[in-house]
């Protein structure tokens, strides 16, 4: 379980929106450290949810299915147990099948389309666990087969934000990690 150095606010002392998110997280994950710590700064939490998630992630020019695929790939690469639990549910809600979700580790799977594989390749480039972070001409061409430059920019921005938030979550020990997570709590 996470052991953050930042204060954890009890649910009874949280604003209603955070208390509701805390309850949902406890039901889904059995952990809500993220919400307990963010209750220290409700305005920052609300910005993240409304401006990033509602306006950019769930809005924008790229169909949500591909953003969910990207987000799930990043969380599996990063080994974020907290994220993976919620991201799998959201990927299903966005129309990804169990076969597609299970194929994330096998980019040659017949369950994935060429468009899916291009998005997954972008996720690997944007992840925190690779030093091959550049989007080269070959990957751009693969993406450009399915997305215009504005959409590629949006996917890249979303993936980069999610990777940065993952680094933040791990650095402040706000989430549970999978065994494969390359980021470990400070000793």
Image (cartoon, grey):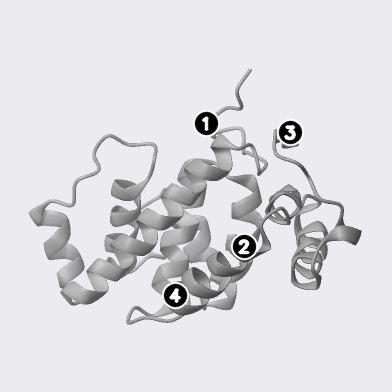
Q: Nearer the viewer, residue 107 or 139?
A: 139
Residue, disc 3: 3
> Separation of disc 4 and disc 1 at Cα?
28 Å
Q: Nearer the viewer, mark 2 or mark 3?
A: 2
81 shown above or below 184: below
Q: Nearer the viewer, residue 109 or 46?
A: 46
Q: Nearer the viewer, mark 2 or mark 1?
A: 2
Is tag 2's residue or tag 1's residue first in the polypeptide sequence?
A: 2
Q: Residues within 10 Å of mark 4 (few under 14, many from 20)?
A: some
Going by the image, does 24 lie left or right of 179?
right
Whether tag 4 and tag 2 are in contact, CB under 8 A, the answer is: no
Is tag 2's residue or tag 3's residue first in the polypeptide sequence?
A: 3
Image coordinates of residue 171 in percent, x first then y, are 55, 35
> Separation of disc 3 and disc 1 at Cα?
14 Å
Quadrant where the image shows the N terminus? top right
The residue shown at (81%, 72%) is 16
> Separation of disc 4 and disc 2 at Cα?
24 Å
Q: Residues within 10 Å of mark 3 (few under 14, many from 20)?
A: few
Is tag 4's residue or tag 3's residue first in the polypeptide sequence?
A: 3
Is tag 4's residue or tag 2's residue first in the polypeptide sequence?
A: 2
Is tag 3's residue or tag 1's residue first in the polypeptide sequence?
A: 3
Q: Nearer the viewer, mark 3 or mark 1?
A: 3
Is tag 4's residue or tag 1's residue first in the polypeptide sequence?
A: 4
Residue, disc 1: 183
Residue, disc 4: 65
Residue, disc 2: 45
> Separation of disc 2 and disc 1 at Cα?
23 Å
Going by the image, does 7 lie left or right of 12?
left
> Separation of disc 4 and disc 3 at Cα?
33 Å
Q: Residues within 10 Å of mark 2 (few under 14, many from 20)?
A: some
Secondary structure at badge 3 equals loop
């Amino acid at each position: 379980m996470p052991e953050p150095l930042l204060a954890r606010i009890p649910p009874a002392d949280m604003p209603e929106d955070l208390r509701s998110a805390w309850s949902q997280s406890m039901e889904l994950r059995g952990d809500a450290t993220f919400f307990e710590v963010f209750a220290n700064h409700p305005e920052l939490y609300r910005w993240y949810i409304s401006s990033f998630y509602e306006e950019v992630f769930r809005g924008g020019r790229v169909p949500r299915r591909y953003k969910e695929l990207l987000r799930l790939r990043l969380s599996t690469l990063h080994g974020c147990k907290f994220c993976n639990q919620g991201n799998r549910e959201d990927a299903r809600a966005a129309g990804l099948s169990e076969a597609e979700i299970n194929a994330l580790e096998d980019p040659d799977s017949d369950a994935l389309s060429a468009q899916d594989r291009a998005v997954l390749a972008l996720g690997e480039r944007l992840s925190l666990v690779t030093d091959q972070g550049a989007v080269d001409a070959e990957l751009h061409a693969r993406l450009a087969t399915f997305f215009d430059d504005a959409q590629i920019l949006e996917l890249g921005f979303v993936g980069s934000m999610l990777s940065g938030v993952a680094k933040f979550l791990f650095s402040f020990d706000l989430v549970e990690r999978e065994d494969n997570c390359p980021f470990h709590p400070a000793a």
